[in-house]
Image (spheres, rainbow, N blue to C red):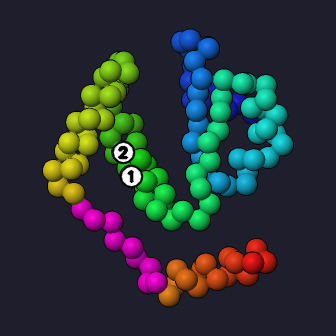
Amino acid sequence: MALGGHFYSGGDTDVPIHLIMDNYATHKTDKVKAWLAAHPRYSIHFTPTSASWMNLVERFFSTLSEKWIKRQAHISVKDLEASIEYYLETYNQNPKPFRWHKKADEILGSVARAAKALGK
């Protein structure tokens, strides 16, 4: 599992790295647990289960990453921070609400099917 090289390379190897992930089962496999045990500087923090509001947070960071950060070259952490601050200022000047595309009945139907599948 080549997890570490994708997140951080170089620098101070004593600095802890915190990964925030959704509660997907593949993040909790024995292979992942073994890798984490062998790499103690990495810690995983999971988002809460059934927290639909987190989807909006994930979507925001995805947009920030895809439409802003990945399209630029940053020469330092300070440069990256300034770039993110600029994006947030620009984004907040013309905010747009997120619109759900599914009707409440469709969402509740999905929840009911998931609960039935999980035996709840």
**Which residue position is annotated with label 2?**
64
- As for residue 1 lying within the magenta part, the answer is no
Residue appearing at x 15%, y 50% in the figure? 93
Disc 2, SS: helix
Q: Which mark is residue 60?
A: 1
Residue appearing at x 59%, y 65% in the figure? 50
Whether 93 is drawn above or below 110: the answer is above
Q: Are marks 1 and 2 in contact (CB under 8 Å)?
A: yes
Q: CA distance from mark 1 to mark 2?
A: 6 Å
Residue appearing at x 49%, y 57% in the figure? 54
What is the x, y in percent for residue 70? Answer: 39, 36
Chain part drawn in magenta: 96-104
Which quarter of the rendered picture does the C terminus lie within? Answer: bottom right
Q: Residue furthest bottom?
A: 105
Amino acid residing under circle 1? Phe
Residue appearing at x 34%, y 71% in the figure? 99
What is the x, y in percent for residue 95? Answer: 22, 57
Query: Does the image show residue 32?
Result: yes
Mark 1 Cα within 10 Å, few/some/many (few <14, many 20+)?
few
Using the rendered view, name the quadrant where residue 81 is placed: top left
Using the rendered view, name the quadrant where residue 14 is placed: top right
Mark 2 Cα within 10 Å, few/some/many (few <14, many 20+)?
some
Disc 1, SS: helix
